[in-house]
Image (spheres, coloured by chain):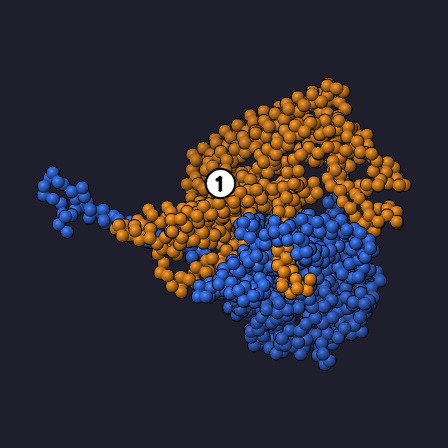
Chain colours: A orange, B blue
């Protein structure tokens, strides 16, 4: 033992343990996100039971079990639960009860000891509603304009059919509201800006003014038609409703146009659950958020993130690559260049929030303000580019990721054997030709690696974006059917910011938790994939040059 | 050479293009080469310039904080309305600095241009017949509320408002007098005789309070409330009189704070009577305070904006700030001297507080005007303005212009000031400051409040301490794990395993910190709060368990040990760590029951340790997690690249592998490890999202592990979107960004230099 101690082996074991702990932390974290993120979509069974705290009335409990935990009796007693003095530990369950509008408490802890037998009635139904979160209960009657049309056994099938109809109507309403009316509003604003511009330039003639008025009238007419169609659709969609029995026996009538989805998890086979799961997952990815982002999908956030990263790539690639080529191939190597190189590399370690501050101050206020005054005077005092937006977010991230691209490209250029370069020069090629026709093509994979790493970094960065263009809820996507199609000045939504916002700023933090895990999962998957690609390319590259330079 | 010349013989024509074409081609190639050279050069310079711009721009935005205050007499204008000899009782300026106002003792108010002195308009208030103006009082500057007192004992409150119109797109400002209680003067109380020596007015929630004091020390106070009759639209004014205790000497000045809790009456010798008027029906003198040193008297006094602190000027030239400070023990507020300002050369004659900030101008009887700032306690500038005593000063609401009137002078001096950031002094940012409403000088960061008159508190100390605290706890977890892991991975670990471990840990570096922050805030913080013993048991169990397993391993029969070659210890430990972790989790409630009375959280509170759910420990865990890969990656490289012949030499001399590590590898690689730690520290200092989400963001100054903090970076993220561009707060946030930039840049550069040296050393070994 003493000898073992003296040999230092214990330290080796401890050091090994450090690696083990680190690895377990990494994989544990990923596992946690995977499990919780994927778990979000699974149709959990709905429990029906009762809860009877000694000395109070028995209440019916209907809901999904979220998690269970074991706490000390003492801490529960301090929290006011009637736990007997001699009981050491207590298990409690967190149930999602839904029915926020009925009871006001959609998440509640129940102490195991006071819960009755857990039953899983097959007709327990979960309704995902457009407002007020989920509803748990048993369906009683289906109403059409207040008249019962289905009850008992055929209720469910009839309900499904009518729900599909109301969802179709809802989609149509939404299309008109978002797409067509949004388009008219956009053109209306265009007319206003055109007129204001003419006014500012002093070219507003009565003739022009009449034209503007005509354009406006035409748009108004278009709008009236749409509005009429919209009114009929809304009337149609309001036709059906369903009467549900909530926990405790209360009857609640819910209009079908307020329902997104309905399922009876206790009555689903595993196969049906998987199908439901996949559908839910797709709805999550391609759906729009509801209820202050705490429900629905995250499509605008994914779309915003991707658009921003794409714009960033378009900016950062040429500049990063050219700067790297300059540093490696053209600049005179010496102490000054070494200083510059170290400085550029070090910028990768500068806190991202600093870039955000710079972006807000310089890009948004200085550059954006100048652009507004020069090109968009008609919109003033409402800023166009003089406010945070997609372009500034991309530009800030481009600046932030420049060092990444430069480092990676330089590394790639340095790896190219000098024999190749010399061969090209010896054949009479100019320096430029050698560079563009021989060296750069060989270094392309390195540039790709740099770009992918830059994208991975950009996709996960949040702090600077909070300052330069990412918002909680953007009314429009940055790309749409209205000229000029890509709207660089618009504010965008972002996956990372979505996590921060929904997890920490939302009123129903608990209800949103599962959704945030799912969002985090998407973000992690995206970034892990990007990084793995970059690593693969890099390893492949190293192998390739190792063999070539040998 | 001859071979490449074009042959005369057509049948043997060279494949080369003609001479001219080759010339042209060569020229084009030359141009292309040039384009490439200059294009790439321009792009390269552009990028370097853009990156350098970050430094310059941040400097540029913070620079105005350091700019010295400028204050000078720009010009003078003849006293407007001079043909009317009545003395001036008040001067004012509008917020566009285009209109000055002069209130005279005859009840005439003359509006003039402060640029030329030309008279714009003139108004007259109703002076009762057979009476003259005997006193004039005003509310806080920002309220633009005044009161005339007449010799027959009546008073007339009036408001000065400015209307803005935009005929033809040009702004036109016109002054307007309004009389909230009607244009007819009215009496306050029946007891006090008319010739007021001091008068004041305050607008409260229920109406206007007017108080007047006279030569024999009696004070009258009345509350006027205007009520509009819903049916007739008539305005009815009711008056409620209150009897205030008289003071023994003539009243020199009366001041009522905006909360209507205290009335300060100052007598002609500088004694202040603090009268409690919370219940105005039962007023009582709480205390008497001598405001100036013996022998001197108070010659001017006024509230700063918000009426929480009182600036007192004495006949000896002293200027001091007084506030109601709650006694720690009795919780009774006492008027306390908070700070003094630089002495004026002569008796203070007038104090003019700024409209929106805690600054004020002081005039004295040598004609000097001083500009002081209360929060930072500094005298920003003091300039001689006129040869005679200053009698009135008016400062504009945007603090860029002031009017100064001297005694007997028929001219107004116009002062131009440039003083945008008076609060950003070294002592204001880094020292303890006694803020309004506090019982002692403190370090506080509180940049905005609900009220216009809020005193912003810009101490960078809580943020800096918070930043260091967060980084410290992160390093406490991250450094040992990362360095020990790096040593093992680089020196002991088997090759195949290393090829998995290293990329995995490096992948972790790319993990968005928003996710770490989210998990720390939403999952870890409540979990740890409920299961505090896990931390302790993991800290004890894990190392002991590993050692025990290691020792047990050596006791195993050789043939079992040989199944797993050395270098796989870490893999062997995986089940051990998982098992011990599970043990720690399941025993947690029982440990709480056994040692901490059933709740460790409560136990902390009982022993007097404050516990926040989101605290430094959580931040340390999450951010430690984030810095592990950074430190690990660089330290691992440093250890791995220690030349083999050094270690082999050591081993050949009979040292055990661990002795080699301690004696040879670590000393050689230590600069690299050091630079790894520095880079990790740089990352921890600047990390924003984790701190934002897991720390609770309360700017407190302590190093308690179980309380939160606010860091510089998180503070920027929280506050920058909401601040007004160009303001002091905005620039201070830029300053903190600059501090972060410089700090991390220096850390990283130092680390980089150390690493380059190390690389050279390895190459030479």
Image quadrant in which you'd find residue B71: bottom right
The one nearer the camera, B143 or A529, is A529
Residue B161 falls in which quadrant of the image?
bottom right
- Residue occupying the point 52% across, 63% down: B647
Name the residue located 14 percent from the left edge and 48 percent from the top edge.
Answer: B3
Residue B133 appears in the picture as rendered: no
B445 relative position to A342: left or right = right
Q: How many marks?
A: 1
SS under mark 1: loop
| Foreground of the two, B723 or B486 | B486
Q: Is residue B468 visible?
A: yes
* Disc 1 target residue: A487
Q: Position of residue B268 (x, y in %)?
A: 73, 75
Most extreme residue toward the bottom is B295
Q: Is residue A227 left or right of residue A443?
A: right
- Where's residue A324, x and y in %? 41, 53
Q: Position of residue B21 (x, y in %)?
A: 19, 45
């Amino acid at each position: 033992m003493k000898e073992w101690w003296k040999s230092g082996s214990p330290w080796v074991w401890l050091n090994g343990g450090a690696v083990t702990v680190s690895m377990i932390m990494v994989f544990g974290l990923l596992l946690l996100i995977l499990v919780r993120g994927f778990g979000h979509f699974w149709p959990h069974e709905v429990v029906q039971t009762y809860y009877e705290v000694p000395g109070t009335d028995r209440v019916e409990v209907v809901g999904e079990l979220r998690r269970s935990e074991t706490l000390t009796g003492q801490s529960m007693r301090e929290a006011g639960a009637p736990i007997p003095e001699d009981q050491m530990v207590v298990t409690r369950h967190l149930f999602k009860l839904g029915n926020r509008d009925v009871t006001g408490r959609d998440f509640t802890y129940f102490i195991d000891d006071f819960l009755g037998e857990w039953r899983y009635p097959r007709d327990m139904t979960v309704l995902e509603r457009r407002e007020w979160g989920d509803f748990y209960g048993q369906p009683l009657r289906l109403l059409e304009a207040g008249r019962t049309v289905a009850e008992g056994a055929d209720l469910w099938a009839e309900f499904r059919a009518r729900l599909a109809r109301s969802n179709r109507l809802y989609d149509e309403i939404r299309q008109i509201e978002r797409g067509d009316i949004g388009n008219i509003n956009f053109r209306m604003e265009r007319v206003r800006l055109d007129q204001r511009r003419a006014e500012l330039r002093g070219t507003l003639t009565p003739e022009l003014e009449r034209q503007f008025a005509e354009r406006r009238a035409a748009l108004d007419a278009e709008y009236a038609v749409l509005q009429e169609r919209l009114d009929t659709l809304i009337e149609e969609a309001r036709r059906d409703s369903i009467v549900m029995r909530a926990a405790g026996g209360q009857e609640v009538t819910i209009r079908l146009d307020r329902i997104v989805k309905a399922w009876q998890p206790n009555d689903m086979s595993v196969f049906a659950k998987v199908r439901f799961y996949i559908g839910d997952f797709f709805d999550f990815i391609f759906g729009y958020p509801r209820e202050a982002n705490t429900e629905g999908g995250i499509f605008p956030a994914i779309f915003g993130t991707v658009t921003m990263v794409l714009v960033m790539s378009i900016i950062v690639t040429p500049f990063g690559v050219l700067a790297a080529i300059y540093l490696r191939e053209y600049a005179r190597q010496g102490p000054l260049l070494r200083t510059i190189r170290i400085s550029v590399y070090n910028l990768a370690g500068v806190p991202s929030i600093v870039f955000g501050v710079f972006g807000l101050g310089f890009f948004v206020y200085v550059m954006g303000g100048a652009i507004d005054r020069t090109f968009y005077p008609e919109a003033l005092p409402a800023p166009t580019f003089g406010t945070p937006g997609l372009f500034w977010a991309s530009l800030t991230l481009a600046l932030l990721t420049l060092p990444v691209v430069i480092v990676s490209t330089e590394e790639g250029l340095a790896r190219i054997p000098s024999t190749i370069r010399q061969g090209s020069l010896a054949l009479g090629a100019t320096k430029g030709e050698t560079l563009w026709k021989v060296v750069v093509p060989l270094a392309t994979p390195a540039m790709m690696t740099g770009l992918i790493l830059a994208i991975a970094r950009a996709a996960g960065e949040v702090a600077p974006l909070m300052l330069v263009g990412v918002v909680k809820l953007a009314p429009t996507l940055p790309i749409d059917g209205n000229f000029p199609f890509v709207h660089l000045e618009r504010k965008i939504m972002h996956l990372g910011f979505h996590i921060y916002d929904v997890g920490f700023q939302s009123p129903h933090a608990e209800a949103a938790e599962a959704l945030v895990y799912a969002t985090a999962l998407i973000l992690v998957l995206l970034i892990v994939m990007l990084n793995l690609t970059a690593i693969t390319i890099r390893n492949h590259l190293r192998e390739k040059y190792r063999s070539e330079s040998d | 050479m001859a071979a490449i010349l074009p042959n005369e013989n057509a049948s043997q024509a060279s494949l080369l293009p003609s001479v001219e074409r080759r010339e042209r081609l060569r020229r084009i190639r030359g141009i292309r080469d040039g384009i490439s050279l200059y294009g790439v050069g321009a792009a390269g310079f552009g990028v370097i310039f853009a990156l350098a711009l970050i430094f310059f721009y941040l400097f540029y935005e913070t620079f105005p904080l350091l700019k010295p205050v400028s204050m000078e007499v720009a010009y003078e204008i003849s006293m407007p309305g001079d043909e009317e000899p009545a003395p001036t009782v008040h001067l004012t300026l509008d917020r566009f600095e285009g209109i000055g106002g002069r209130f005279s003792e005859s009840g005439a108010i003359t509006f003039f241009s402060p640029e030329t002195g030309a008279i714009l308009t003139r108004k007259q208030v109703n002076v009762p017949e057979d009476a003259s103006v005997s006193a004039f009082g005003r509310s806080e500057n920002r309220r633009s509320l005044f009161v005339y007192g007449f010799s027959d004992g009546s008073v007339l409150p009036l408001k000065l408002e400015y209307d803005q119109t935009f005929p033809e797109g040009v702004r036109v400002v016109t002054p307007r007098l309004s009389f909230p209680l009607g244009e007819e003067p009215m009496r306050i109380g029946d007891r006090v005789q008319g010739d007021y020596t001091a008068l004041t007015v305050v607008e409260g929630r229920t109406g206007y309070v007017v108080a007047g004091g006279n030569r024999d020390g009696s004070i009258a106070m009345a509350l006027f409330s205007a009520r509009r009759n819903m049916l007739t639209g008539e305005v009815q004014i009711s008056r409620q009189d209150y009897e205030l205790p008289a003071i023994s000497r003539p009243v020199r000045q009366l001041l009522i704070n905006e909360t209507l809790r205290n009335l300060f009456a100052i007598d002609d010798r500088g004694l202040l009577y603090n009268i409690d008027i919370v219940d105005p029906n039962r007023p009582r003198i709480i205390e008497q305070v001598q405001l100036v040193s013996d022998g001197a008297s108070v010659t001017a006094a006024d509230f700063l904006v918000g009426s929480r602190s009182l600036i007192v000027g004495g006949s000896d030239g002293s200027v001091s700030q007084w506030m109601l400070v709650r006694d720690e023990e009795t919780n009774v507020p006492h008027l306390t001297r908070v700070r003094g300002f630089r002495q004026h050369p002569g008796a203070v004659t007038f104090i003019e507080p700024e409209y929106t900030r805690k600054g004020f101008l002081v005039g004295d009887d040598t004609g000097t005007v001083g500009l002081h700032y209360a929060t930072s306690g500094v005298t920003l500038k003091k300039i001689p303005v006129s040869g005679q005593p200053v009698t009135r000063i008016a400062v504009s609401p945007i603090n860029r212009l002031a009017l100064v009137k001297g005694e007997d002078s028929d001219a107004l001096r116009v002062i131009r000031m440039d003083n945008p950031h008076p609060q950003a002094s070294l002592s204001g940012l880094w020292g303890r400051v006694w803020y309004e409403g506090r019982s002692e000088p403190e370090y506080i960061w509180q940049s905005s409040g609900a009220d216009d008159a809020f005193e912003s508190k810009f101490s960078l100390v809580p943020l800096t301490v918070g930043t260091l605290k967060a980084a410290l706890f992160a390093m406490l977890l991250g450094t040992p794990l990362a360095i020990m892991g790096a040593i093992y991975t680089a020196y002991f670990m088997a090759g195949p395993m290393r090829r998995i471990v290293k990329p995995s840990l490096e992948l972790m570096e790319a993990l968005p910190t928003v996710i770490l922050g989210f998990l720390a805030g939403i999952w870890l913080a409540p979990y740890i709060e409920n299961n505090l013993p896990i931390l302790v048991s993991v800290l004890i169990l894990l190392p002991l368990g590993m050692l025990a397993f290691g020792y047990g391993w050596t006791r195993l029969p050789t043939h079992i040990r040989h199944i797993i070659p050395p270098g796989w210890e870490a893999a062997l430990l995986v089940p051990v760590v998982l098992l011990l972790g599970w043990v720690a989790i399941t025993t947690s409630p029982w440990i709480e029951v056994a040692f901490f009375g059933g709740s460790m959280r409560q136990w902390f509170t009982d022993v007097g340790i404050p516990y926040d759910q989101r605290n430094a420990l959580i931040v340390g865990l999450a951010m430690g997690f984030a810095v592990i890969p950074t430190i690990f990656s660089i330290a691992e490289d440093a250890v791995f690249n220690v030349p083999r012949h050094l270690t082999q030499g050591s081993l050949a001399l009979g040292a055990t592998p661990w002795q080699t590590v301690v004696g040879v590898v670590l000393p050689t690689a230590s600069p690299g490890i050091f630079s790894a730690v520095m880079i990790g520290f740089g990352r921890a200092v600047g990390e924003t999202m984790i701190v934002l989400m897991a720390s609770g963001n309360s700017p407190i100054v302590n190093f308690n592990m179980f309380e939160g903090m606010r860091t510089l970076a998180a503070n920027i993220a929280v506050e920058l979107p909401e601040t007004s561009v160009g303001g002091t707060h905005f620039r201070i946030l830029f300053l903190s960004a600059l501090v972060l930039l410089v700090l991390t840049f220096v850390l990283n550069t130092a680390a980089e230099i150390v690493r380059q040296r190390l690389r050279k050393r390895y190459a030479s070994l």
